[in-house]
Image (tube, grey):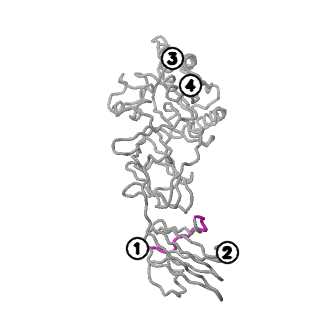
Amino acid sequence: MSKRGNLSVELKIGEGDIDLILTDRWYNVCDLCAAELSPFSFKLEKADIPDGFATVNIDFDTESGLASVRLGEKVLFNVRMKTPCPTGISYLIMQCSADGEGTYIKKLEKRDGIMKFVPYTDPSFRFTGVWQENANGEIVSYKLSAMAEVGFTGNRIDLLCRGGGEGIRWFIDDKPVEAKSTVSGYRFDTEYGEHSLKFIVRLGDRIYISGVKIGEDENLFATKERPYIHFIGDSITEAKRSYAFQCVEDLDADYCIIAKGGMAVCDGFGWYMQPTKPYGDPDRLGMETMYWKLADMGYIEDIGDYNFNYCRTPDIISVFLGTNDYLDKPADEEAGNIEKFKVHYAAFIEKLRKQFPKTPIIILQALSDKYCRVRGIDAAFELMKEKVDNVYLVDSNNWGIEISEDGTHPTQKGYDDLGSKLAVYMRKFL
């Protein structure tokens, strides 16, 4: 009795066809109702099998309700379970219909469905965004968004993990799916074949992954890489449906977003609330410091530095900062904020360049300018060009992006237009 397993039948069909029935109860072998009343049944015809003896493999799983019929490793077809089967499969019935020579059975084998563990360190896994190992033998997601993907063969994959949440988006073969929660993580069922599992973790749904389980005879493989765009920014980048999402849709790209509403470049600047300190505390950290930390943006508790061990090199880095760096009125300029911003922004880009020596870095110009934002970013870019190569400033302030009533953030149409125009600009680097 097995809820999951494999049947291997070596047979030769002389004339006619043969019905194979997987059932959870006893029937007379000639019972004509057995096929209709049993969980799985299917017909094999002579045209399905080459001349002589051939091995037919049947992988079944009563919990997912799927069975796959293979000729060797070639999938002939998949079968969906017709009736509930809470106890598992107990019998195989074979009914042959032929006027002359029937079907010959040479060998019959059964194996229970054994799952094998593959750790996250397997090279088939691809991690995009901020991931880091912990002392418990797990890899952990950090920041606003993190993505992981792995290819697998078979009809089932179990993700062994803890944490997670309702905000995680799951995909099988790039199509959204619902995950089945288990005591050890999440389970995904599909038809037999080659597939990909991808998931995107958002802030607040941190997940701790130890690996996956797949069928004993199945394998993992690395999926085809898409371009990878790395976005760094503030609330304009962090928004639930920001320009970043339209951009990667247009480019069919993977992405990571490191952003926080109210985030400045400079330490001590910015407008975001701190969970453990009062609003306006001068210890508020800017992107120049927070980017290199594991702590979620806006939290000043030191939970360690990001070591970049599992960092995928971006194809493009997009940086959209400066809106929250106190460049809003004459007093800001008089206080020397343009000079401070220029130096700190250029130093941040120089540090990014050391981490990613060959990746193009695209700087977006401010979409709104209360006083000296545009001048500040222009000044910073001139200093950047002196320090690093392969850095570009796009005049997004002249793209005609529709701004909302608050005077700072785009409307949804503005976000979509910004994303599409940025994608057009980025194509020359891909």
Mark before the other along the chain sequence, 2 or 1: 2
Q: Residue 390's x, y, as percent?
A: 60, 25
Magenta region, residue range: 73-88
Disc nearest the viewer among 3 and 2: 2
Give the amino acid at mark 4.
Ala
Question: Which residue is the site of mark 3?
Answer: 342
Give the amino acid at mark 3.
Lys
Residue 101: name its quadrant: bottom right
Mark before the other along the chain sequence, 3 or 4: 3
Q: Secondary structure at mark 3?
A: helix
Question: Which residue is the site of mark 2?
Answer: 47
Q: Are marks 4 and 2 in contact (CB under 8 Å)?
A: no
Q: How many other residues sit within 10 Å of disc 2, few (<14), some (14-19) or many (≥20)?
A: few
Q: Residue 421's x, y, as percent?
A: 64, 34
Q: Residue at horizontal 34%, vertical 31%?
A: 302
Question: Which residue is the site of mark 1?
Answer: 87
Disc nearest the viewer among 2 and 1: 2
